Image (cartoon, grey):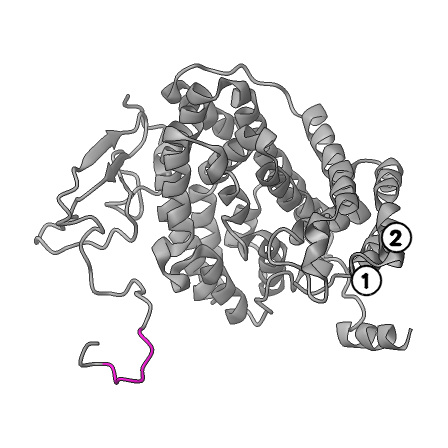
Amino acid sequence: MSAEHGAGDPAPDPVPGPTAMPGPGAGSGEPVTITVCPDGPLLVRGGYELLDGDDRPIDPGRATVALCRCGASSIKPFCDGSHKRARFRAR
Amino acid sequence: MRQPQPRGPLGEDLLAVLREEPGTPGAEARAAALPAAARAAVSRAAGVLGDDDVQLSLFVLHALHYQGVDGVDDRWESDPELLRAREVLSGALEAQLRAELPADTVPGTPQSVADALFAMAAEDDGPSLARHLSGRADDEQAREFLQLKSVYQLMEGDPHTWGIPRLSGRAKAGLIEIQVDEYGGGSASRMHSALFAAGMREAGLDDSYGSAVDRVPAEWLAGVNTVTMFGLHRRLRGAVVGHLAMYEMTSSVPSRFLARGFHRLGLPAAAAFYDEHVEADAAHEQIAARDMAGGLVVEDPAVAADVFFGARCVLHLDALAARHALARWEAGESALRPATAEPSRRGAAELVR
């Protein structure tokens, strides 16, 4: 129990907040695999850690994450499916 | 869920049976008549997809396998006569879908399966509810949309979960990878069904499962009944996989439009539900197409054609539901069925009877 919570407080569910956290598998020693999806994103699984340009962790929000490869996503670094409308082609 | 109102003779008979205690002579006699009543309802229907009596009755029969119906004995779930009636209705639903959808040539490698499914999604020219919600829908239409969607979204993921024990290897791992995310990675408040419930509460709507069923027309129940039918039959494991694949593949881009619409209407919790789906489903569609659907086609070729059947059902039924709502809204009408009598008054009347 952390100092912020009284003994009778229910433990809060971990809800994604403004504080970034490392990837769920980070530090697990699990091998990282990156699948190059034809005409689509990079699918990343395993013990990865996602960092921004200032080395700050980015919360991936889920264990397996799709990273934009076409440049058209509005939620970069994540994929939002825009490669389809952009007719991105790379096998 | 609350007991819904029947929409015809079959629903009347079914709900009357369900209010009885299983095993009593009266209940058994009434239950034994249900398969014939189901066949009669199918014969009366011009097509079962849009038939309210058939779809509502099948929805209630399916609800017995999920979280049950208020005031209904759990033993009815496995009553042989009810199962027979359910098979009559779902058999007619499957037959109509197979008759209306073209058969696909099945490719042989996971990547070619993914390519074929992405091409099927890209060629789809069904009407877009998401675009309407994005820029045009008013506050009332947005609330109607949430109620129409709630019959699926408040149990999001559940029908496909029945596929897990029926799969193996890469397809099973892919399905689980997606479902873990649907269920919030183990956090109750991050489950997609919980995010949708928060959006309903924000819009002033009842977020308990099935609260909107009486207002939801057959064309919308048909989509939920179809995926439940896939989930409940091992024979249809290919279709449940294809259904989830196409569901994910047609989600991320429309979800972006829907998030924009709900932000515009000042409903940030509903918008957050769709924002989550933009990001989640962009990953899920890749897993679903290649690992899950592609994996199954290679591992279990006997059901490969059904992967494409299940995928086509998503596009077909989404278009049916969207056409229905858009036609009503364009005519200046509600897309919901008219509100029925107060459930509390109905309950009191039954006590007197």
Q: Which of marks 1 and 2 is nearer the N terminus?
A: 1
The dot on residue B20 is 1
The reply to whether the C-beta atoms of the residues labelled 1 and 2 are less than 8 Å apart is yes
Image x and y of residue B331, in percent: 74, 52
Q: Residue at x 86, y 46 (%)?
A: B32
Tell me residue B250's x, y (percent).
48, 38
Name the secondary structure under disc 2: helix
Residue type indicated by callout 2: Arg
- Asked if residue B96 lies left or right of residue B132, the reply is right
Left or right: residue B71 versus residue B159 is: right
Q: How far apart are marks 1 and 2 (CA)?
A: 9 Å
Magenta segment = A5-11
SS type, badge 1: loop
Give the residue displayed 76% in from the left and 50% down from the top.
B57
Question: Is B202 included in the stretch rendered in magenta?
Answer: no
Viewer-proximal residue among B89 and B195: B89
- Decide: is A39 above or below B61: above
Q: In which quarter of the image is the C terminus of chain B?
A: bottom right
Figure check: A62 above or below B87: below
Name the foreground residue: B263 vs B169.
B169
- Looking at the rendered structure, the number of numbered marks drawn on it comes to 2
- Mark 1: give few (<14), some (14-19) or many (20+) Cα within 10 Å: some
